[in-house]
Image (tube, rainbow, N blue to C red):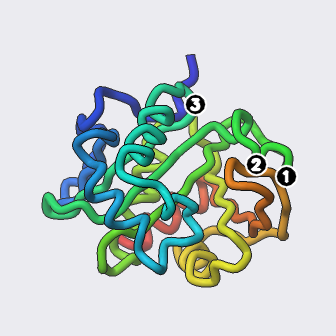
Amino acid sequence: MDDRLLTGAPGEEVWQDGAGTAVHLLDPAADVDVLHSWVTRPDAGFFGLGDLGRDELRETYEFVGSLPTHHAYLVRAAGEPVALVQLYHPEDDPVATAYDVRPGDVGAHFFKGADLDWRVVGTSLLAFAFACPAVRRIVVEPDVRNRAAIARTAAMGFELAGQVRFESPHGPKDARLGFLTRDRAESLLAAAR
């Protein structure tokens, strides 16, 4: 059994930071309206879900929820939905063709849904991503054209690596890899306290 991803029932709170940020396993049926409003915004094009209707979006996340290797989470701050986080085993994802996966790697997609200070929520998201002791390194792969995501990745403390190309579910993807080790994350989180 792999223990890199927190799991539970749809909608269940799986982590909280004690300061008002809570992470819930995504409930595709209950959360579809908020997700649809986020992924169809003009600035959400790089996430690749903007053309989906509500039913298609719900079905997409029901499929994700059926996979033991990929989980989606809804992040709430003060009870309000603010972000979507997807964590996954990179060895079971197309990104595995683009870099050498190490034991303890977890892939991550962070989607900012609400207008908020990403630096504040980003700290909580890093703590959440490393909540499982088996996680040794977080790997991200934002689209190379998504300058805002790349800047946010660097601001969160990820070390940016080279550009890669791989086949994603939406077709070929040119991405910028970023890595954050547990040791580096712990240092960043300690400095933020």
Q: Is the residue marked by circle 1 packed among few (<14), some (14-19), or many (20+) residues within 10 Å?
A: some
Q: Would residue 2 be visible to someone looking at this image?
A: yes
Quadrant occupied by the C terminus: bottom left
The one nearer the camera, 175 or 43, is 43
Q: Which residue is mark 3?
A: 69
Q: Is the residue marked by circle 2 packed among few (<14), some (14-19), or many (20+) residues within 10 Å?
A: many
Q: Residue at x 58, y 30 (%)?
A: 69
State how far apart marks 1 and 2 are (Cα).
Answer: 5 Å
Q: Residue at x 85, y 45 (%)?
A: 97
The one nearer the camera, 49 or 144, is 49
The amino acid marked with disc number 2 is Val
Lateral position of residue 92 relative to residue 117, left or right: right
Q: Determine whether label 1 and label 2 are within 8 Å by CB.
A: yes
Q: On the image, which quarter does residue 94 sit in?
A: top right
Task: Give the percent coordinates (x, y) of residue 95.
Answer: 76, 48
State how far apart marks 3 and 1 are (Cα).
Answer: 18 Å
Return the disc, 3 or 2, that comes first in the chain's sequence. Answer: 3
**Badge 1 element:** loop
Lateral position of residue 160 relative to residue 41, left or right: right
Q: Which residue is mark 1?
A: 98
Q: Which residue is mark 2?
A: 95
**Badge 2 element:** helix
Q: Residue at x 38, y 42 (%)?
A: 58
Residue 9's tag is none
Task: Give the percent coordinates (x, y) of residue 178.
Answer: 70, 65
Q: Is the residue marked by circle 3 packed among few (<14), some (14-19), or many (20+) residues within 10 Å?
A: some
**Badge 3 element:** loop
State how far apart marks 3 and 2 are (Cα).
Answer: 13 Å
Lateral position of residue 59 relative to residue 160, left or right: left
In the image, is residue 53 above or below residue 156? Answer: above
The amino acid marked with disc number 1 is Ala
